Amino acid sequence: MAENRIDGKKGNTKVNRPFYFVYRHLLIFFFLIFSKSVVMADEEKDSRPFIFYPKAYNNWNFEMSAGLSLTKLPMNVVEEEINQSPMPELHFRLGLPAKISLTTELKSNYLANYGSLGVQWTFWKKFVDVAVGGKFNAWFGHLEMESFKLKAEGMILSPYISLGFDFKDFLLSVQFETQTNRMWTQIDDKDIARTDHKLSGIAVNINAEQPLWHNHYVVMGVKLNYAKFFYQSWMSYTTINEYLFYPEFRFGFVL
Amino acid sequence: MIKKRILFIYFSIIFIYSCEFDMADVPIPVFSESILKNTTPINDFIKSNMEGVYSSNDSKSEFGESLVIKMSGQHLSIFTGKNAAYLIFQGGIYESSLVFEGYWRFATGSETGPTKLVINNNEGAGDLINGKKPELLKIQCYYYKGPGKIEKHITLTYKRPLNNQPPNFKIIGHRGGGRNSDRLPVSENSVEMIMFAERLGANAIEIDVKLTKDKIPVLFHDENLSLRLINESYFVGSIANYTYDQLKTFVTLKNGGKIPTLEEALDTVLEKTNLSLVWLDIKSNGLIADVTKVQKKYINKAKAMKRDLEILIGLPSEEAVIEYISIKDKMDIPALCELSLDLVRQTNAFVWAPRWSLGLQSAEANIMHSEGRRVFTWTLDDSQFIKVYLEDGNFDGILSNYPSIVAYEYFIR
Amino acid sequence: MNILSGKYFLFITSLICTLIPVSSKEIIPDSTFRLIFELSGGYSAALDSNYTDGGITPCIRLMWEPNRKLNIGLETGYLLIEKHSVDEKKYETGKTEMEVSLRAIPLLVVFNMEIWKTDFFAAMGASYVWTELDAFNQKVYSPVWNYSLMFGWGYTYNLTDNFGFGIEAKSYIFTRLNKSVGSMQFKLKYCVVDW
């Protein structure tokens, strides 16, 4: 057995480095971003069909995308049972006045079903487009077969800031979000428990949108979730009180 | 354009550090100098009179208001209702005091720290050492927390004996006592874990049995070898592809130890623990015949040693039921069935073990009780669920990866 | 920094690099679509080994090159992840020598893009991985499927419109094995059909 000797001095306790590292660098990064004064560009008509890129839409412009996401679930949580969780997904975005957009996301693999409603405001455009927003996410899961009569539902609040880099024939967006989660469990249709996580995780969502052929745009992305709870593995009822890595890969077509 | 490239590189650098983090091990914290050096061992009278429910003078501490103390062999364990915390100690008599040294740990996390307990002469130690039941029993608990290892102090006062209703309730440690993902100091399904289980509050264990290529029953949970359970990345695929000699020689378990045979595991249970029940979880088809031979041998060995030990073969699937039914002379092969009530009756299983996700199953449990059978449920880990299932359920045992939580909820009632 | 802990970073950076255009000016695309067959071979070794324990790695790839920058395709090949051998030795279980190797056949979806006249690519998919063990007079062949990623960089010199050759450096990541295998390869590229 490993030992950790204590002499009343600092022990060899592992500090949660990733969080401190990311947050410290986020502060430095925002200082870089805001070191020049904000100049809002005049609104340009942009005919490129993007969904994730934070640039403001033209009023009442609507886009949608359809694709597939694949989440790699940590082995400590799911062991051998589920390695990956594929989920077909749909994304919608509607442009409103005052550089506001409404966003909706729907995903399902029957065992876990997810929907989100969000709003974002593009407030800066110079060499990078910046938007802030928030999403209210709701999910429900059900497993009724053999020795399972489980249902669970939850909600996740995720405020975010999104940065966009326009390379003309491709658009790269990077979104930083935090997640607060609440989950309810029912067994045999009876409420059993409620679980709350005030800061259940953070995520960095990187998406690249570009034409694959002619003007047919595709979205390729990865969402790096660093979380204590992830709705796609709800049925594992993990009790591990640690932040674990859930990378979510995405590929879709902007329709 | 250049600014975009710089920012892009910046993001990339962030990802170097934030991409993937495995869970760090949680080493057992120890004091640089042991306080047990000049102590004499504590006797059974002291151990049995220390067991009980205690209250803390600081309900806001990490361990909450009420604590349960339980002895197992030479170890003293404390189970709490807050943070899924447990404490494990070894102790001794030092002059006219009782001293204990060990550590605290949050079962579902990684926080831990060294701890010592002191019972002073005038707070019960004197009476205990002299073979007298004390009127007042107080334990001074000093524990260390945080990176700076700040010392904290609480006083535990004995309130009442442990609850033991329903009697013979089984607190069953999963995979021998716990999982690798909970970063215990020993590997799941190992002899070391079997010896550790009682310190976590278990009075019974469940172990997973598979067959090697040369038909030797061994303890292993997963279908395939992987870095979840072993240290060698170059061994992959099913354990049934390897001989026992190959596994024993070249494979080491994640937190130390070797893959044990079923016989080694049951020898450990008999000779090194006071566990009262072993549930053999059969992990693949075609091995009931081989496993029941070992089961019979050790049931007879326990009888010869006058040891109160049940060994039940688990029947998790219909294929296992068919195999079991085909064995002649099943009277000496007690079984536990996880399936429907009809199959429980068909196999004449001693225990019905439905999965927790089917609910409390109170009506069905009553039927089983009326037929003289017991009911266990598995695998309950969430403390809220454990409390509900204990209070509202009608179970004779709970299988859990956190037997310390089950032990607390059971003994505190 | 252990390169293994940054495997996702390297993969994601490559994924992102596939999307950086050469120039910020919008390029007016032609309408030619191509199907490209690539054959490559070289040496590979686990990135945490002493590189002499590697082996020859062949690889084939079929890429769809539409009239834009991003190309998508499929790749498979064969590689040796690691191997160990121990001379005859006495153990508690008896005397034996031991030889063990871990090999893989990846099946990957590849995303590729030309940036600054070189190819950046990243891939994900599954690999058929197996152990071959010889010890105690028993041979073992034990397979399993594993999730895997790949990223790399390459350069191609086009001899003609339809044929070229080049070099590639890439890394395969086997997440459940916590292993990364680096590979240097020489490749031939042929346009099977264009339309």
Image (cartoon, coloured by chain):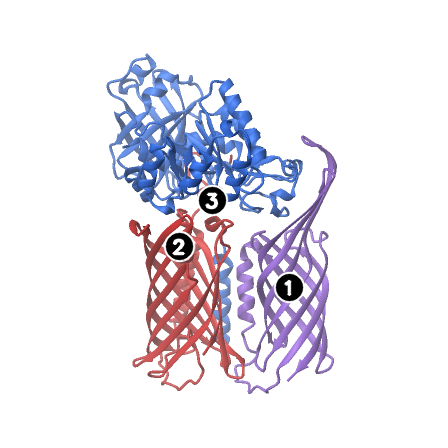
Chain colours: A red, B blue, C purple
Residue position for label 1: C170
Q: Residue at x 62, y 63 (%)?
A: C107
Residue position for label 2: A143
Res B117 → quadrant:
top left
> Amino acid under label 2?
Leu
Mark identifier at residue B181: 3
Q: Are marks 1 and 2 in contact (CB under 8 Å)?
A: no
Q: Do the residues marked 1 and 2 share a common chain?
A: no
| Crowd rating for badge 1 (residues with CA inside 10 Å; few <14, some 14–19, many 20+) | some
> Amino acid under label 3?
Ser
Asked whether, in this view, residue A86 is left or right of residue C74, the answer is left
Q: CA distance from mark 2 to mark 3?
A: 24 Å
Label 2 lies in what chain? A
In this view, B332 is above or below B257: above
- Whether residue B342 appears in this view of the structure is yes
Q: CA distance from mark 1 to mark 2?
A: 42 Å
> Amino acid under label 1?
Lys
Label 3 lies in what chain? B
Between marks 2 and 3 in the image, the one whose residue lies nearer the viewer: 2
In this view, C17 is above or below B79: below
Q: Whole-percent x and y of residue B189? A: 52, 37
